[in-house]
Amino acid sequence: MIAVLSSRAAGAQGVWALEQHHYFDSVLADPRAPQTTVLFPAKADSFPFAVKEGSSLVWDLSVGAALPILGVGTRRGTEDDTGVGRRDFGIGIWFPLSFHMVEDMGKDPSNPILDTDYRFGGLVKAQVGLPIHNRKVHSAHVGAKFQFGHESTHLGDEFELGALREHQAEFVRVNVSYEYYDAGGSFEPNFGKDGVQQLKIRAGNIWLWRPEKGWYSRTVLQPFGTFIEGASRNHEPYLQAEWKWQSVFGDTFSLVSSFDARNRTIYQYTPAPDDTRTNAPEPTEWSFNTIVGVRQDRKGQGISGRITPTYYVRFYHGVNPNGQFRSQRGFSEFGFGVHFGI
């Protein structure tokens, strides 16, 4: 489709391949985004079936990127890190790939991996530059995205062995694995001279691609041969906002504040006599992820010049966002981290 569009408007549009374009960049606080971040040290509430109860020190790591594949866009204006120019349009295909891990550093001598999450899929992003330019609004964009993906989650082996040893009667091992699609839209105005204050306002919804399958399998992995009632709710809406004020501390550093709120499903592992499914919807909890930090705008050459770090403080409260632990409500995590933008 993109190739056909580009051939029909060769004079006004340009086709690109394997180039990074900022049509609909993820906000820092998006917990599902394909981004590379290191959160350490971080203080987190106790996880279910921990060897020792109580909060602990954790590593919270994400490694990922949205790899650009192919796209097309108009070339009338100047494209920058906020996206296309005024009255311009761009659309492209990306391949998002990410890995997430949480490690306990505070209570168990073996420092077990608590959970790992893997996500991959396909992503289409589009953006339009609005014809707005006055004393207050430097520029503005509207955008949309559609992502289809798969998520697979796994408990750490050492954590699982400890849970079997200390909580044998209560511990269950659930296969949280599903396909989903994520559709969202955005409005992004930029204020001040040269658009130094950039605002992103977004909303969207995540839907199960196969709602009859649910977020997790009804067959329990441990203890083998037992069942739980299947999930009924099949979507999770979200709201996001991010504000960046460039060059607050000279030409190098910018202030950044990012926020994500989503109505998460609280997983219910209710025992069932066989492979059945309940019609009762699961309870939900609005979960909030807040990041405040400083972005270093590096303009050097080579790989180091292309990496833009953001040093931040993060606070999360709501449903535990990690794999099987999404049955835990009222979970909090606070820590210091670095986001590596490319």
Image (cartoon, helix red, strand yellow):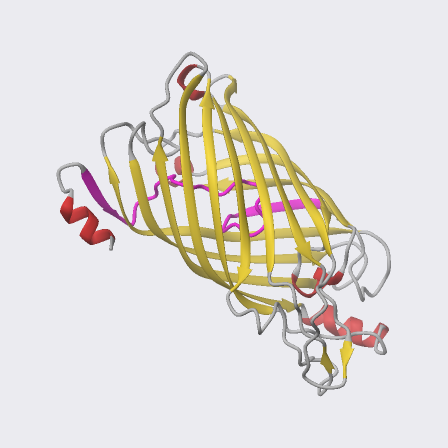
* Residue 115 position within the rendered picture, expressed as x and y whole percent measured from the top left: 66, 63
- Asked if one can make out residue 112 in the rendered structure from this viewpoint, the answer is no
The span picked out in magenta is 13-41
Q: Is residue 309 above or below residue 232?
A: above
Q: Is residue 24 magenta?
A: yes
For residue 338, side relative to residue 132 (left or right): right
Q: Residue at x 78, y 59 (%)?
A: 47
Q: Residue at x 50, y 56 (%)?
A: 98
Q: Residue at x 43, y 48 (%)?
A: 145
* Residue 89 position within the rendered picture, expressed as x and y whole percent measured from the top left: 30, 37
* Residue 116 position within the rendered picture, expressed as x and y whole percent measured from the top left: 61, 63
Q: Is residue 54 magenta?
A: no
Q: Nearer the viewer, residue 162 or 206?
A: 206
Q: Nearer the viewer, residue 255 or 311?
A: 255
Q: Main secondary structure of the magenta part?
A: loop
Give the quadrant of the C terminus.
top left
* Residue 9 position within the rendered picture, expressed as x and y whole percent measured from the top left: 16, 42
- Asked if one can make out residue 291 in the rendered structure from this viewpoint, the answer is yes
